[in-house]
Image (tube, helix red, strand yellow):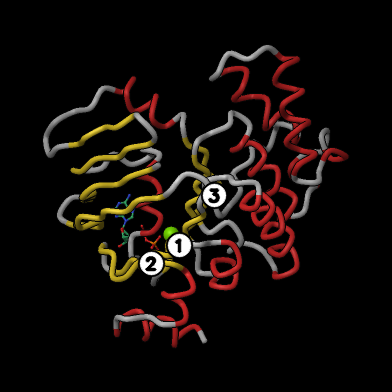
């Protein structure tokens, strides 16, 4: 179980998250949708603490951290929570001077202290899962965008995080390449990977997410089962947003 309680995030005078509370069940896939600038990326970054919340509590499993205005939280505690998450970015962000397999083994070896052999075995297992075992020794620049994103997904999953966070995982890809990434994410969803995904792609969201939260202006406008929110939105704001995409 992942729980966000009353998360606030401020950048100077700008309050970007205005008290967001959400729960994500173990094994579930949740989509964060809403207009650009609504706070989706910031919320994901507050879950893995790439951004430090200004206030609120982030709980992942039994581990919780509470942030308060003007109080510092120990880096060690942030690191512990962060390690329970894996993140996939819109722009893949592979290390360009590492091969596909090295992109996956690097963090396992340097951050987690795995042996080279262990890390290689785990990386091959993940490359297999995303259908890229044959590209293990390829450089990122020689891979298609869809293949790069699949390596990035494998890298994020390698240390077995409790939750996979995906920020617009298909937005930088042509429809055909997006489809191969959706396929991989759909498989992970079927296997029970806990995922929270920010996306513009309602097709992706409705295909793999059970739960949807609609975020606008830093607040949750509406949340619930995907079938309800997409087919029978209750709020005017949600209706307008969905209509604008149709
Ligand atoms: P979304 O992902 O829904 O498009 P974001 O979380 O990226 O929304 O952005 C929400 C708001 O926060 C925007 O107004 C954006 O300009 C602002 N913002 C995001 N990151 C920063 C930052 N590091 N410094 C200042 N403002 C930021
Ligand atoms: Mg974003």
Along the polypeptide, which appears first: circle 3 or circle 2?
3
- Point out which mark residue 211 bears: 1
* Residue pointed to by mark 2: 224
* Ligand 1: image quarter: bottom left
Q: Residue at x 70, y 33 (%)?
A: 97
Q: Where, quadrant-wise, is the N terminus in this rendering?
A: top left
Real-space Cα distance between discs 1 and 2? 6 Å
Task: Tell me whether circle 1 and circle 2 mark residues in contact (CB < 8 Å).
Answer: yes
- On the image, the x and y values in percent for residue 152 come to 64, 43
- Point out which mark residue 89 bears: 3
Along the polypeptide, which appears first: circle 1 or circle 2?
1
Q: Nearer the viewer, residue 135 or 56?
A: 56
Q: Residue at x 35, y 30 (%)?
A: 62
Instruction: Please tell me how crowded label 2 is: few (under 14), some (14-19), or many (20+) other residues with Cα within 10 Å.
Output: some
Q: Considering only vertical position in the picture, is 38 above or below 195? A: below
Q: Given the current orientation, which residue lies at the most extreme left position?
A: 70
- On the image, the x and y values in percent for residue 212 come to 43, 65
- Residue 29 located left or right of residue 189: left
- On the image, the x and y values in percent for residue 167 come to 50, 54
- Residue 100 located left or right of residue 30: right
- Residue 213 located left or right of residue 186: left
- Residue 4 located left or right of residue 96: left
């Amino acid at each position: 179980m992942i729980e966000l309680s009353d998360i606030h995030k401020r950048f100077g005078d700008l309050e970007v998250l205005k008290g967001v509370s959400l729960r994500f069940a173990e094994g579930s896939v949740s989509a964060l949708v809403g207009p650009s600038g609504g706070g989706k990326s910031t919320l994901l970054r507050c879950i893995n603490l790439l951004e430090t919340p200004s206030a609120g509590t982030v709980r992942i499993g039994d581990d919780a951290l509470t942030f308060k205005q003007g109080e510092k939280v120990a880096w060690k505690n942030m690191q512990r929570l962060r390690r329970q998450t894996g993140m996939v970015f819109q722009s893949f962000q592979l290390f360009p001077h590492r091969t596909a397999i090295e992109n996956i083994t690097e963090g396992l070896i340097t951050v987690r202290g795995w042996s080279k052999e262990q890390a290689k075995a785990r990386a091959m297992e993940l490359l297999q899962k995303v259908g890229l075992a044959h590209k293990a020794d390829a450089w990122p620049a020689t891979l298609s965008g869809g293949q790069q994103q699949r390596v990035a997904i494998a890298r994020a999953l390698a240390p077995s995080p409790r939750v996979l966070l995906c920020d617009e995982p298909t937005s930088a890809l042509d429809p055909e390449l997006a489809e191969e990434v959706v396929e991989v994410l759909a498989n992970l969803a079927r296997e029970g990977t806990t995922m929270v995904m920010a996306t513009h792609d309602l097709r992706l969201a409705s295909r793999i997410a059970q739960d949807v939260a609609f975020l606008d202006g830093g607040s949750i406008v509406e949340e619930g089962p995907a079938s309800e929110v997409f087919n029978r939105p209750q709020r005017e704001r949600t209706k307008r947003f969905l209509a604008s995409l149709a």
